[in-house]
Image (tube, helix red, strand yellow):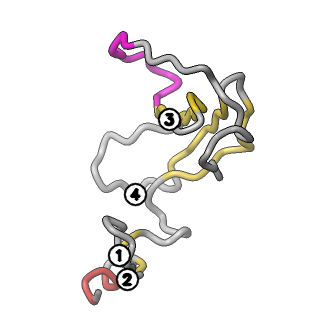
Amino acid sequence: QEACEARGCTWCSTDVPNAPWCFFPEDSPYGYARSGNAEKTDKGWRVTLNKRQALTLFGNDISPVVLEVEFQTKDRLRFKLYDPNKQRFEVPLKISGPGVTAEEASYEVEF
């Protein structure tokens, strides 16, 4: 706990299996923040994220990044993060689902 808090992180012990106890606070200079509102798509949502500051943990950060959320089935959600300014190779794997709406899904998505 001491090492976590010394880094400026938040410590929160929990009984939830595999949940992290040490994490960045919401106002951390690291990571990404939503740019504008979430955009509704035919299959779910699209959100643009921008780096919060120039600080980096791993280097070669991309900004902006797009997050696409797709409601595939009642119990399956697909999300994809990608660089909107540079095309990359994607495995040509088609995973299709009947497509459901947020109201039909057994899970919730919040931004």
Q: CA distance from mark 3 to mark 1?
A: 24 Å
Give the residues in magenta: 82-93
Which circle marks residue 79 in the picture? 3
| Mark 4 or mark 1: whose residue is earlier in sequence | 1
Query: From the viewer's perspective, is the residue at label 4 or at label 2 nearer?
Result: 2
Q: Which residue is mark 4?
A: 55
Across and down, in percent, residue 3 comes to: 25, 83
Which residue in the rendered view is the most extreme toward the left? 3
Residue at 74% from the left image edge and 32% from the top image edge:
40
Query: For the residue marked with disc 3, what is the amino acid?
Result: Phe
Q: CA distance from mark 4 to mark 1?
A: 23 Å
Query: From the viewer's perspective, is the residue at label 4 or at label 1 nearer?
Result: 1
Residue 21 in the figure: left or right of residue 66: left
Which circle marks residue 21 in the picture? 1
Query: For the residue marked with disc 1, what is the amino acid?
Result: Trp
| Mark 2 or mark 1: whose residue is earlier in sequence | 2
Residue at 63% from the left image edge and 38% from the top image edge:
47
Residue at 50% from the left image edge and 48% from the top image edge:
51
Q: Which residue is mark 2?
A: 13
Q: CA distance from mark 4 to mark 2?
A: 27 Å
